[in-house]
Structures are given as C-alpha cells and as structure tokens.
Image (tube, grey):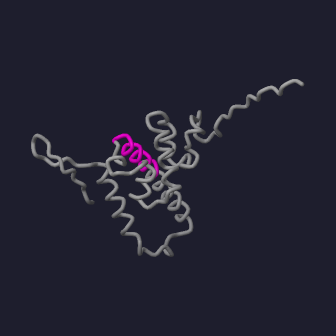
Amino acid sequence: MRVSIVGVMSVSDTPVVDPVGSVLAAARDGLASLVDTPLWSIGDEALPQLLTEANRIVAAAQELTLRLVAEADRRGIPDTAGATCTAGWLDHSTVCGRREAGVLTRTAKALTGRYDLVRIALAGQVIDPASADAHEAPWIHPRQKPIRNTYHKPKPQP
C-alpha cells in the first residue's frame, strides 16, 4: 500500500499522512493489479455479487469526487490556476468532458454542507449522481421519488 505524504512538516518534523491520498492510491493500485486478471473463472453465483460490489466502489468514488470538487471550489483553486470557472478547471484537470464537469460542479456545490443524507446515499449507491441534482433535493427517503410542487395556479376567469 502506497502512502501519500503531504510536504508540510509538523512541529515534531514527522510527515503528515494524507488519509484520502493513501486510500485512493491503494484503491488505484489494487484495481490496476486486476487489469489482466481473467474473469472466466468467476462462478456464476459470484459474478452478480462482484458486479454489485464494483458498482458500490464506483458510487463511493463519485461521492468523494463531489466532495473534492466542492473543496477545490471553496478554496479557489480553479481561480488560482487561471480557470474562468470550476467546471472548466475540472474538465482540463481530469479530461472528463465539459458537460460532465458542469454536472459534477453543479452537484458538488449544491450538496456542500446542506444535503448530507444525499451525499451518504450517493456513497452507498442508494441514488446515482444524476439523481442528486439540487433541484430534486432534499429527499425524505433516498429511494422515494422527490416531492414535486403540485400546486397549480387557478386559471384566470374570462
């Protein structure tokens, strides 16, 4: 397992370990070790479970990505890098595409500090990032459809 070290030293000159970087490096290394692993030997009963687990990992990574985008935006990192907007900076930094960068940025900003249950539901793969749009939040229960305003203005009388 690789450990990421932040370049700042504490009072005792002990390197500060970055837990997020360490976990991401371990996940990346672990998944990289599976690139050439043949899947034909996986049993029929185990394959659906592995697929579900892989999707849970993706969901947790998406939730972390949203928090990292929000934190970068909060700190003004895109501005410091000379970007005109956070979505443009994200697209340039990750090559995820302008549209996806816009969705990620909008969702990250909307969820920051306001919708922890939605964020937790994202991490647990209860909802997907496309459903986490701030216009649909908040949810009473993650699997319940969002409550929409059903009030209709009365039609004007002739």
**Outermost residue toward the left in this view:** 12
**x, y percent for residue 33:** 36, 69
Q: How many callouts does the rendering have?
A: 0
- Image coordinates of residue 76 in percent, x first then y, are 35, 43
Q: Residue furthest right?
A: 158
Which residue does the image show at 84% across and 25% down from the upper left?
156
Identify which residue, 107 or 31, lies in the foreground: 107
Q: Residue at x 26, y 49 (%)?
A: 18
Task: Indicate whether 74 appears above or below 30.
Answer: above
Q: Which of these two is toward me, 41 or 52?
A: 52
**Which residue shows up at 18% across the image and 51% down it?**
7
Q: Quarter of the image holding residue 133?
A: top right
Single out the residue that lies furthest toward the top.
Answer: 157
Given residues 128 and 53, the one toward you in this image is: 128
Left or right relative to 11: residue 119: right
Image quarter hosting the C terminus? top right
Please provide percent x and percent y for residue 86.
42, 48
Residue 125: percent from left, percent from top: 52, 49
Residues 84 and 52: in front is 84
Residue at (49% x, 74% y) in the render: 41
Assign the N terminus to one quadrant of the image: bottom left
Q: Is residue 25 magenta?
A: no
Q: Provide the residue span drawn in magenta.
A: 62-75
Residue 70 highlighted magenta (yes or no):
yes
Picture layout, residue 38 above or below residue 47: below
Main SS of the magenta part reads: helix
Is 119 left, or right, of 156 in this rendering?
left
